Image (tube, coloured by chain):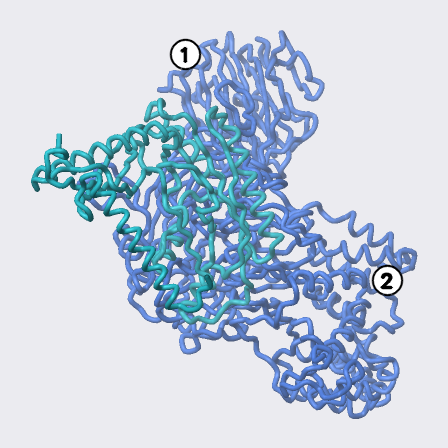
């Protein structure tokens, strides 16, 4: 059959939808559920553990009007920080360089002049060569907190001694405030939990149990009989972080590191050294069983 | 297509002529026609100048000029537009500019009469004001006229002589007697290309030379070399004359160029020197060889490295402010909470103005000046109360950058305003001279030159032609000069006298017994002396020796430095106990006396005479008894001013210290002397032995940087009713009289309207016979100090300061202030707001570099290979290729902090401590944390015994590990620590 018009298409779709609905309703009736009725609850569960990783992000940059100069500055800045870190001889420390970026934009001086309507200087846009050197301390869960903090302190100290900015500068914070955005690298030290499999399992179980308990409570309060689970929705799962990238062409994209490029597995990040909860939040819908002896709630 | 057409910037039109065939001369505004942004007329001018320059015997070769021209283009990274400066130099009227254009046009047409008429238009106008050369160098129109004439073709010069030779010849004939100089000057100024022009310039040089005006003499001879290429006067002779004048004028550092020129072309040409014929090459070599070693180029001087302290514990520390909170018992140091006039913070680029003369540290903190004893940290004087200081610095609009201080000899010079002036608008600053010892005000420009407000740091120079350094450089110079210790003793008898005694002259009864020098052996009427056969440096030294007296009754011994000779020996008696010293005329000695009314005493003995018994220093009360038979250890240190003597009884450990202010060189007849011991027994007896002895010369404590003259003070200023106009004042440093003022030009933004940003303040450099002024607003100016004439100006990119209230600010304005710097024959400058570093070849002058650089960069110094910059990062640039070689980002939060350069290291005081950086690689060799980590960093300098840092929180001195190198407690040399 050849469908000839939009009206015909709509008619066919409506027919399919009605048939499907009728089939669902008949299924519910067949199982003793009240068609279209149900109890929807949320269930939350969590399991906690100390972080197993510590990450410190250092921004290595070379900025100059001439690209050659920017490259020399970047080269030397990176070499200097890598050299001093290597001399620390920390066993569980790994160093990775991430996402080298070359961007061109107005210098911060020029931006400020521009914003204030002041005559521009003769300087041309700056080339910014940058990357993030990520320091990762692995297997830190069993480390003594004081020792761990000391180790992190050493990393920060040598990095700053090497001329690296750890965290945003005051000017960067002001600039971010001015444009209503998050400053780059606002939390350079992160405590990370990325061995989540077992914890998640526990959290899921707890969330499901929580949802079931809530549903029973509601059913009892409303003198109905709770049926089986009709649908489940994950509302939040610890470790699945949303990714966002802010791009503003007007602003000098300093150290722009789109997090979507990082392609990391499930992980939870905290800015403090404490047990990190892995939380799972579910929305669960239970059916309501039609009154009758066969379907009385146990 | 249009890119190939000449464009007229005045008409804003492309010339409607066939591309590439169009001759700019047919366009009315010929001077404005350009090919791809370059002026056609400018190219013609450039060619004329090029002709003039390549004929300069003392200048670089043509290939070098071409290389420089290429470098300019390369340095602009793709071709910069004309620089936008925020400062204007006085330029000539459009009439003059048009006349120059017409001249060039007529020359091309070989219309000589009209061409010369155009020149008359120029010369009839004021000779003041500048004309811009195509290379953006601004030169006085008079000099330009001379260059235009010199650049004419031969036919033009012949025509000129037809028109003007009679006038020039008449002047030449008049040039006798009292009118000689005036007539010759007129010829040189107006008719240099006439048939007598070169002779007039040569003769004028001779006259100046005979009068002792060496600067003008060499300038006149150079005129012939530069502008009269066809002259028949021997170039070799002229070059030798110039070289001779430079040597006599203490400008021997400039001979290298002349030596190269002579050897390249005229080495075998015969010249006449003092009536005798000699080869030009031999004569210039002789002149160069006879130069004293000190007469090398200042920029090649390098100072010795020094090791950073090994302990963070300070020797002393003075904190400007402690916590204002009465409940805060920690006494934590509080930084100066600087704000601009809108209450916005501006602390991140503040450096306390500091100066040192090696004895004291002088600070100018917001108009409250103070001095500290460098050795003890004791505050010696201050000009205001500390609460005034707190008030000054905490109010809005404190203008910290406008204060400065330097010290020269016995005076400090500061730019300051008194606390009572704090509310005065517009802010007026004055130049103040004080007695360095007491702080007493000797001069205040506010009282005698009230129409001037001072801007920028002062600069001291000899009159004229000295080589002063701005304040920051002086700190570095002191640091380096004072820390040049020798590592090994020059005399080392630390194991006794069994070896090496042949270097000593043993006089009288002295003998070596059991590795001891026995001055008297127990006999009576004995007199002995021991002196080094060769004189050694006594400018500053350390010496240590041990002696022992046994069976001792008389007389004692002296440690002696003397200029009479290695065999000098005094009498044993001379009617008293002469200790074999009395009679050695040119001498300084320290006695250890065991006989007479001043027995068991010490004291300073001068010129062969011992102090009287009354003035001797008795050991009574110090538990030292020279006759005890104990071994005594004596340690003496002399820093060029004070002789410190410490004697210790090795057995009882009792000790005694004495200090004598003495100018040893003055008493011994020079910086070198024979050193040793004298001893006698008189009519009694004693066995007097010297057991061990070491002697190590040291670098003397620097009173002031040696390169400074200090006869005149140059300082920037503006009149109270013309605040946008910048002038340079020349003030007699002794009489405090204003010798002259020179108006440089005008700021685009009236500094009085600058509330938020920094005011542009000039910095100076004196090199050879020129005073160079960087206005830090887009203009670099060269002045002749002896005439106050502006020789040339050069405009560079510099945005104006931000005036008015910024509606949105997320960082304070960024900039870096440093003085011009001469290195490798180039004059470097970097305006405080400029994103460009420029350099001019002083041989021309011609532009050399125009290179992008971080706006915060400051010029620090140079060596043979690299130019070093500071600011928010340290960096090194290759002097040949202009490339960035390395860059080191340090946590330099004090943007005005000036690094100190030594032979192989750079030292920088930052918020995280003092960094020691390798000059070749930029690698951090060592980081010394210190005890001032609350601070933002700042200045540092070094004395023979201490490292001193000055931050926005405190002045802190750290002990260096003695002068015998940097040793740890085990006596092992410390290696560079990462």
- Residue at image x 88%, y 61%? B272
Q: Which of B581 and A125 lies nearest the eye of the viewer?
A: A125
Of labels 1 and 2, the one closer to you: 2
Q: Which of the 4 image quadrants contains residue B340?
A: bottom left
Residue B794, horizontal then vertical, whole percent? 62, 69
Q: Residues within 10 Å of mark 2 (few under 14, many from 20)?
A: many
Among the chains pictured, the one given blue colouring is B
Q: Is residue A77 left or right of residue A46?
A: right
Q: Does residue B219 lie above or below B480 as drawn? A: below
Q: Does residue A31 lie above or below B592 as drawn? A: below
Residue A293, horizontal then vertical, whole percent? 10, 34
Name the residue tied to disc 2.
Answer: B236
Residue B174, horizontal then vertical, whole percent? 79, 84
Residue B167, horizontal then vertical, whole percent? 80, 88
Answer with mark 1 or mark 2, whichever residue precedes in sequence: 2
Whether marks 1 and 2 lie on the same chain: yes
Q: Is residue B690 left or right of residue B288?
A: left
For the residues labelled 1 and 2, say whether their Cβ atoms are less than 8 Å apart: no
Q: Does residue B936 lie above or below B819 as drawn? A: above
Q: Residues within 10 Å of mark 1 (few under 14, many from 20)?
A: few
Residue B147 in view of the camera: no
Residue B652's disc is 1
Q: Is residue B498 left or right of residue A12?
A: right
Q: Is residue A151 left or right of residue B246?
A: left
Spatial separation of the CA atoms under disc 1 and disc 2: 75 Å
């Amino acid at each position: 059959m050849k469908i000839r018009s939009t009206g015909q298409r709509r008619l066919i779709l409506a027919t399919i939808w009605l048939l499907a609905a009728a089939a669902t309703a008949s299924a519910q009736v067949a199982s003793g559920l009240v068609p279209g009725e149900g109890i929807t609850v949320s269930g939350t569960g969590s399991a906690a553990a100390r972080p197993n990783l510590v990450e410190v992000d250092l921004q290595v940059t070379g900025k100059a009007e001439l690209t050659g100069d920017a490259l020399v500055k970047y080269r030397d800045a990176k070499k200097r920080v890598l050299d001093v870190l290597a001399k620390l001889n920390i066993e569980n420390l790994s160093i990775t360089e991430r996402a080298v970026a070359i961007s061109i934009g107005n210098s911060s001086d020029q931006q400020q002049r521009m914003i204030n309507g002041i005559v521009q200087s003769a300087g041309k846009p700056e080339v910014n060569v940058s990357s993030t050197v990520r320091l990762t301390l692995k297997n830190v869960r069993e480390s003594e907190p004081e020792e761990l903090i000391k180790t992190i302190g050493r990393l920060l100290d040598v990095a700053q001694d090497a001329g690296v900015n750890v965290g945003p500068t005051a000017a960067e914070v002001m600039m971010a405030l001015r444009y209503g955005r998050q400053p780059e690298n606002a939390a350079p030290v992160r405590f990370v939990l990325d061995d989540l499999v077992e914890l998640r399992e526990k959290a899921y179980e707890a969330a499901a149990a929580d949802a079931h308990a809530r549903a029973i409570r509601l059913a009892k309060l409303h003198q109905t009989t709770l049926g089986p689970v009709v649908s489940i929705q994950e509302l939040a799962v610890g470790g699945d972080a949303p990714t966002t990238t802010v791009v503003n062409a007007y602003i000098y994209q300093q150290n722009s590191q789109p997090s979507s490029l990082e392609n990391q597995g499930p992980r939870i990040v905290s800015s403090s050294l404490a047990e990190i909860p892995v939380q799972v939040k579910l929305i669960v819908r239970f059916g309501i069983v039609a009154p009758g002896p066969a379907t009385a709630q146990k | 297509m249009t890119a190939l057409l000449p464009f007229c910037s005045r008409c804003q039109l492309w010339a409607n002529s066939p591309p590439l065939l169009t001759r700019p001369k047919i366009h009315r505004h010929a001077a404005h026609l350009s090919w791809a942004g370059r002026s056609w007329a400018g190219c013609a001018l450039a060619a004329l100048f090029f002709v003039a320059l390549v004929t300069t015997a003392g200048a670089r070769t043509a290939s070098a000029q071409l290389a420089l021209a290429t470098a300019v283009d390369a340095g602009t990274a793709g071709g910069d537009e004309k620089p936008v400066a925020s400062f204007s130099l006085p330029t000539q009227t459009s009439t003059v500019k048009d006349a120059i254009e017409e001249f060039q046009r007529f020359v091309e047409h070989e219309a000589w009469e009209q061409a010369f008429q155009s020149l008359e238009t120029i010369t009839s106008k004021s000779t003041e004001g500048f004309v811009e050369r195509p290379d953006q160098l601004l030169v006085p129109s008079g000099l330009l006229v001379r260059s235009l004439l010199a650049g004419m073709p031969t036919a033009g010069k012949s025509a000129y002589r037809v028109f003007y030779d009679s006038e020039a010849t008449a002047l030449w004939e008049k040039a006798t007697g009292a009118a000689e100089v005036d007539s010759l000057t007129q010829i040189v100024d107006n008719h240099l290309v006439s048939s007598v022009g070169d002779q007039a310039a040569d003769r004028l040089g001779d006259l100046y030379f005979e009068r002792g005006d060496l600067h003008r003499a060499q300038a006149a001879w150079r005129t012939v070399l530069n502008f009269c290429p066809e002259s028949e006067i021997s170039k070799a002779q002229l070059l030798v004359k110039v070289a001779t004048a430079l040597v006599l004028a203490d400008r021997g550092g400039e001979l290298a160029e002349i030596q190269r020129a002579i050897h390249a072309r005229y080495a075998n040409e015969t010249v006449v020197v003092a009536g005798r014929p000699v080869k030009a090459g031999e004569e210039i070599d002789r002149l160069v060889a006879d130069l004293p070693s000190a007469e090398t180029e200042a920029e090649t001087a390098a100072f010795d490295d020094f090791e950073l302290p090994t302990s963070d514990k300070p020797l002393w520390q003075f904190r400007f402010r402690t916590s204002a909170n009465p409940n805060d018992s920690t006494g934590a140091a509080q930084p100066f909470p600087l704000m601009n006039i809108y209450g916005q913070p501006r602390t991140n680029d503040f450096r306390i103005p500091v100066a040192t003369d090696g004895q004291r540290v002088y600070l100018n903190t917001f108009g409250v000046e103070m001095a500290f004893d460098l050795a003890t940290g004791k505050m010696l004087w201050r000009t205001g109360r500390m609460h005034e200081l707190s008030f000054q610095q905490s109010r809005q609009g404190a203008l910290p950058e406008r204060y400065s201080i330097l010290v020269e000899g016995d005076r400090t010079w500061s730019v300051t305003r008194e606390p009572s002036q704090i509310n005065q608008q517009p802010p007026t600053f004055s130049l103040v001279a004080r007695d360095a010892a007491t702080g007493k005000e000797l001069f205040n420009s506010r009282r005698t030159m009230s129409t001037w407000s001072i801007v920028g740091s002062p600069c001291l120079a000899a009159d004229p032609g000295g080589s002063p350094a701005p304040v920051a450089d002086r700190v570095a110079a002191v640091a380096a000069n004072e820390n040049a210790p020798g590592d090994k003793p020059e005399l080392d008898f630390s194991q006794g006298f069994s070896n090496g005694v042949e270097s000593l002259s043993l006089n009288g009864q002295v003998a070596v017994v059991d590795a001891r020098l026995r001055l008297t052996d127990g006999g009576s009427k004995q007199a002995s002396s021991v002196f080094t056969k060769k004189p050694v440096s006594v400018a500053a030294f350390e010496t240590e020796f041990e002696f022992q007296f046994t069976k001792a009754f008389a007389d004692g011994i002296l440690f002696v430095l003397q200029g009479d000779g290695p065999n000098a020996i005094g009498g044993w008696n001379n009617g008293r106990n002469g200790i074999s010293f009395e009679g050695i005329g040119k001498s300084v000695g320290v006695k250890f006396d065991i006989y007479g009314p001043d027995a068991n005493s010490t004291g300073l003995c001068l010129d062969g005479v011992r102090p009287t018994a009354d003035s001797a220093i008795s050991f009574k009360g110090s538990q030292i008894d020279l006759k005890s038979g104990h071994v005594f250890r004596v340690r003496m240190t002399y820093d060029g001013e004070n002789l410190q003597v410490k004697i210790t009884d090795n057995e009882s450990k009792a000790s005694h210290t004495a200090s004598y202010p003495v100018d040893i060189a003055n008493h011994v007849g020079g910086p070198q002397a024979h050193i040793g011991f004298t001893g006698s027994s008189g009519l009694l007896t004693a066995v007097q032995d010297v057991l061990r002895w070491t002697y190590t010369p040291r670098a003397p404590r620097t009173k002031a940087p040696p390169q400074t003259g200090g006869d005149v003070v140059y300082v920037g200023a503006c009149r109270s009713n013309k605040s946008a106009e910048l002038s340079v004042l020349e003030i007699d440093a002794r009489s405090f009289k204003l010798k002259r003022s020179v108006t440089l030009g005008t700021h685009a933004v009236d500094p009085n309207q600058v509330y938020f940003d920094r005011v542009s303040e000039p910095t100076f450099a004196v090199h050879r016979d020129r005073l160079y002024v960087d206005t830090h607003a887009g203009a670099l100016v060269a002045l002749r100090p002896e005439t106050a004439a502006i020789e040339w100006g050069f405009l560079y990119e510099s945005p104006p300061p931000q005036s008015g209230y910024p509606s949105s600010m997320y960082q304070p304005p960024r900039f870096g202030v440093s003085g011009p710097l001469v290195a490798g024959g180039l004059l470097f400058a970097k305006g405080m707001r400029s994103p460009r570093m420029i350099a001019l070849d002083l041989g021309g002058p011609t532009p050399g570099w125009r290179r992008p650089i971080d706006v915060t960069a400051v010029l620090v110094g140079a060596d043979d290979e690299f130019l070093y910059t500071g600011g928010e990062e340290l960096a090194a640039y290759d002097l040949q290729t202009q490339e960035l070689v390395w860059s080191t980002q340090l946590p330099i939060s004090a943007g005005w902090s000036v690094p100190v350069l030594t032979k192989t290291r750079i030292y920088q005081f930052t918020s995280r401590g003092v960094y020691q950086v390798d000059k070749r690689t930029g690698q951090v060799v060592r980081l010394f944390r210190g005890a001032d980590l609350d601070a933002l960093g700042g200045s540092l300098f070094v004395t023979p015994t201490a490292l001193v840092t000055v931050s926005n929180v405190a002045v802190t001195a750290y002990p260096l590990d003695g002068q015998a190198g940097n040793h740890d407690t085990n006596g092992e040399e410390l290696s560079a620590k990462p």
